[in-house]
Amino acid sequence: MIKTVAIQGIKGSFHHIVSQQYFENEINVIECLTFDKAVESLMNKESDAVIMAIENSIAGSIIPNYALIDSYHLYIVGEHYLDVQHNLLTLSDQTIDDIEEVYSHPMALLQCKEFFKDYPSIKLVEDKDTAEVAQRIHINQLKGIGAIASKLAAELFELEILAPSIQTIAHNETRFVIVKRENHEIPEIEINKASFKFSLDHKRGSLATILNVMSDCKLNLTKIQSLPIIDTPWKYAFFVDVTFADYKDCIKAKSIMNIMAQDFKILGEYKNARI
Amino acid sequence: MIKTVAIQGIKGSFHHIVSQQYFENEINVIECLTFDKAVESLMNKESDAVIMAIENSIAGSIIPNYALIDSYHLYIVGEHYLDVQHNLLTLSDQTIDDIEEVYSHPMALLQCKEFFKDYPSIKLVEDKDTAEVAQRIHINQLKGIGAIASKLAAELFELEILAPSIQTIAHNETRFVIVKRENHEIPEIEINKASFKFSLDHKRGSLATILNVMSDCKLNLTKIQSLPIIDTPWKYAFFVDVTFADYKDCIKAKSIMNIMAQDFKILGEYKNARI
């Protein structure tokens, strides 16, 4: 039973919104300024789970978060998709011409860069967290400064939405995972998605062979990502996500992949959030 | 003939080092503070090519740069691997205990985060460019401030290397690509690597089928990355890199993939820099 989750960011951040949408019951939230700190709180048993952004359409996979899951031997026990809507937030008496600087998380700035092309005089500054900037503007009553953050952050920190949904892509989905120290949050019957990691030598056809196994076992590939293995030239690690109708098919595929691929590892088995 | 290249960052940056190592002849360098600006200079014909970091072992692919190549219909005409060594640079009369803040590019901070765990009082601040911070420390003679940047930046801006090679991974390789408006910088006989993009419906075995084609045509996969296609659920784009001994094999694979995959696109054909 998850009672306390660690999130990257403060209340009002997109990770906070995910915690509200994913969990049905009331949940305690531990605010962390980095993903590393969030994982630390999990390892120290201050939290029962971590919510982590893992991929989006613009930046692709967030590989450092895969590395955290891998190196701390954590498990993905659930996933959630959030349609991330970015808003330009300011104190209520401001117009766009008053704004000299806008602070936000690098990912938010990246996702909104088209909007700011029309306002070349506004300086964009990278910051730790979307909501934390909104909080700072509120506490210090900062004029001339904008935040890019959620509607929830506008409500929590009494800011005005000067421009809504300023991200370049209207339907801007980010995938989040819920991560724990142990595998299996849910009964086997409900499991229909899994994340694996394995490595292969750089030999012609080696990946095709593994994908044929997965296909033969009726697994659908929803994501694949290769990564060179550090200090091991010509060897690659692969991160794959698969969906399936019957968990028995997954068990069969795992037993074959365990023999055919190297360093086969289950990163998590959970419920597909996209049906 | 490439005479002028646009780089992200200023002189002393890692992109500048790549420009020195890749080109045999003397080359003019246009300093740009973002990849977008570098591509703009290429489109305006102010530069003949852009040098772009495209992947590294820690962060994986730099998807926004793939998106720039794709959306501006640019071509990869060459690649270069650089062993990125990060150094802590300060004015010459400083010790580590004097340093209160360290500024650098988010990627450099990420790659050095283990080093700074031993110095929790030092505040890490994200900045635009590694070398530009070194320049700023030099020009304003800033005490108590550190930069994470190259040895070349230390030389150019007369700073001391307070700690050398502070990145977590000793052998920290980044892959850079050289990008132009037109394909084929080199004769066909020298081409032994290619980058493709294609899309597939989410159908079981569809990727395995394409990989089998590539394998049958004697192409070796060196990189694969799936990306959900924006606003098109259940359809995926794939970025792949392949190497081959004979360009004729590549021509054959291309003609089959062009039929079997959707939206097949050649992102570049060039010489493998890793032999």
Image: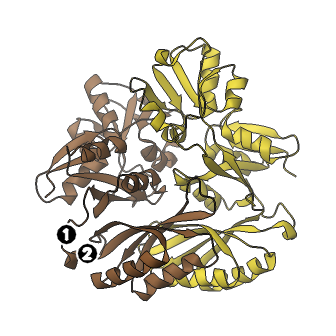
Chain colours: A yellow, B brown
Q: Position of residue B264 (x, y in %)?
A: 43, 69
Q: Is residue A229 above or below residue B249?
A: above
Q: Quarter of the image holding residue A183?
A: bottom right
Identify the element where label 1 is drawn: loop
Q: Residue A73 placed where, x, y %?
A: 68, 62
Dot 2 alpha-carbon crowd within 10 angstroms: few under 14, some 14 to 19, many 20 or more: many
Looking at the picture, tell me which residue is in the foreground, A198 or B54: B54
Farthest residue to the left: give it.
Answer: B26
Label 2 secondary element: loop
| Chain that bears disc 1 | B
Q: Quadrant of residue B129?
A: top left
Mark drawn on residue B235: none
The subunit carrying tag 2 is: B
Q: Is residue A217 above or below residue A17?
A: below
Q: Residue at x 62, y 25 (%)?
A: A134
Q: Which mark is residue B191?
A: 2
Residue at the spot of label 1: B186
Residue A204 can be seen, yes or no: no
Residue A42 image point, x, y percent: 73, 49
Q: Is residue B156 left or right of residue B248?
A: left
Amino acid type of the residue tagged 2 in the rendering: Ile
* Amino acid type indicated by mark 1: Ile
| Disc 1 to disc 2: CB gap under 8 Å | yes
**Residue A260 at least partly seen:** yes
Q: Relative to residue B250, is residue A242 depicted above or below?
A: above
The residue shown at (61%, 21%) is A136
Residue, x 25% and y 47% (percent of image)? B42
Identify the residue at image location x=21%, y=57%: B21
In the rendering, at what x and y percent does residue B23 appear?
A: 17, 58
